[in-house]
């Protein structure tokens, strides 16, 4: 039997979180952290609710996963996030020593790749997983704000 726990499977869960953010008026970015095919953190952007520019989905996920694990390093964990992390989040992910980052849509203006931000040398990156779905959600969100 084929393994049901694919990157697409987990990215769909991150997209569900992004939808929650959208419904709450937050920029629709969702994130989950997985270890051994088990979701240990499930979050989305909370910058508006918390009035905190650092309350990105990834930052919330790092904190939640670290609390779950009981330690600050996320070795053996995979972050699934709908949008390429910004340089602030990439810096936090660097220090967390997360093993893998899987993201959906690129952020050509603010993403860590465009900004030249480095991740931990042992962190693997997979990009473009359900990228169109993630990008469409962002476009829909900003179109709704322009009305």
Image: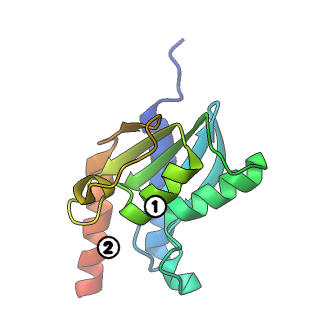
Image: 75 above or below 72: above
Residue 38 vs residue 102, the one in the foreground: 102
For image coordinates 61% across by 33% down, the residue present is 76
Circle 1: element type: helix
On residue 111, the disc is: none
| Outermost residue, top side | 1
N-terminal of the pair, mark 2 or mark 1, is: 1
Image quarter hosting the N terminus: top right
Residue 42 falls in image quadrant:
bottom right
Identify the residue position indicated by label 1 in the image.
Answer: 89
For image coordinates 75% across by 46% down, the residue present is 69
* Badge nearest the viewer, 2 or 1: 1
Image location (x, y in percent) of residue 22: 43, 71
For image coordinates 47% across by 80% down, the residue present is 53
Identify the residue position indicated by label 2 in the image.
Answer: 141
Image location (x, y in percent) of residue 77: 59, 38
Image: 138 above or below 119: below
For image coordinates 30% across by 66% down, the residue present is 138
Instruction: Give the left or right position of residue 38, taking residue 103 as reference.
Output: right
């Amino acid at each position: 039997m084929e393994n049901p726990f694919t990157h697409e499977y987990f990215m769909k869960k991150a997209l569900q979180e992004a939808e929650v953010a959208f419904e709450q008026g937050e920029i629709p970015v969702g994130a989950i952290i997985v270890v051994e095919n088990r979701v240990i953190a499930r979050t989305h952007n909370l910058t508006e609710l918390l009035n905190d520019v650092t309350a990105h989905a990834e930052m919330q996920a790092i904190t939640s996963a670290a609390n779950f694990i009981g330690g600050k390093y996320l070795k053996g964990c995979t972050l699934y996030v709908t949008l390429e992390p910004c340089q602030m989040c990439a810096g936090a992910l660097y220090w967390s020593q997360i093993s893998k980052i899987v993201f959906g849509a690129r952020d050509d203006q603010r993403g860590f790749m465009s900004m030249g931000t480095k991740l931990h040398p042992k962190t693997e990156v997979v990009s473009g997983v359900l990228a169109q779905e993630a990008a469409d959600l962002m476009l829909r969100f900003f179109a709704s704000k322009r009305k």
